[in-house]
Amino acid sequence: MSSLVRKVFGKHLLLTNTLVSGGLMGLGDFVQQNIEWMTSSTKSTRHKYDWKRTGRMAAVGLLGGPLVHGWYKFLDGRLQGISRSTVFKKVVADQLVASPALLLGFFFGIGTMEGKSVKSCSEEVREKFVFIYLIDCLFWPPLQVINFRFVPQHFRVLYVSSAVLVWDVFLSYVKHKNYDNEPNKMTSL
């Protein structure tokens, strides 16, 4: 490995993981805003981005990066190796512990930055969490099998972050979709 790669994915891995996570969360929202504009029936010639919204998404990503970094270190310390059994245990732990915690952090983090009360954030979680978690359980396990079985530890957050871009577009869509005028709310997705 070159000296720059060694520094970025060695000595400065936590910083790298934090910045990549924040940057991709913001980029995911930026992409989602473009999709919203392109599919809008009231499309104007000039699209106005909600940079505060993108900033909130990036901020949650910056907070999540160190958590995911620490989670992977914890998992690798407790469950060593890449056998099928170990990988299975890591994927199950990831789905049962990390995914719900990160999703709750996402909703409460962004809600707090939007000025919402804990009660309002809790209502949004009740409305959207189960749907998002079910999709999470379909999306992440196959990717995490590859991650835990084949990806070297120091590249794990980078690998996951590439999939996170797609995931963050989805999260941004569900988070920011207005369901107030739709009778079946989450079933209208």
Image (tube, rainbow, N blue to C red):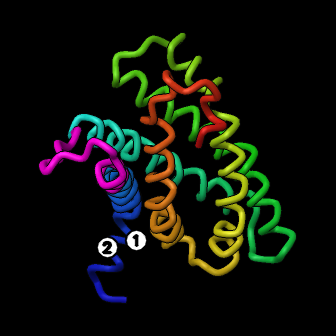
Residue 56 in view (yes/no): yes
Percent of width and height locating residue 187: 66, 37
Mark 1 burial class by Cα count in 10 Å: few <14, some 14-19, many 20+: some
Q: Over which residues does the magenta segment extend?
A: 31-50
Residue 115 to residue 135: above or below: above
Residue 7 is tagged as 2
Percent of width and height locating residue 90: 75, 60
Q: Amino acid at mark 1?
A: Gly
Query: What residue is shown with label 1?
Result: 10
Pick the front one: 55 or 94: 55
127 relative to 164 in the view: left or right: right
Percent of width and height locating residue 78: 74, 57
Pointers 2 and 1 in contact (C-beta within 8 Å): yes
Q: Is residue 128 magenta?
A: no
The structure residue drawn at horizontal position 40% and vertical position 39%, both measured from the top left corner, is: 60
Which residue occupies the extreme front position in the image? 41
Residue 15 in view (yes/no): no
Mark 2, secondary structure of its residue: helix
Q: Quadrant of the N terminus?
A: bottom left
The quadrant in which residue 55 appears is top left
Instruction: Tally the marks.
Output: 2
Q: Quadrant of the C terminus?
A: top right
Pick the front one: 131 or 14: 131
176 relative to 23 in the view: left or right: right
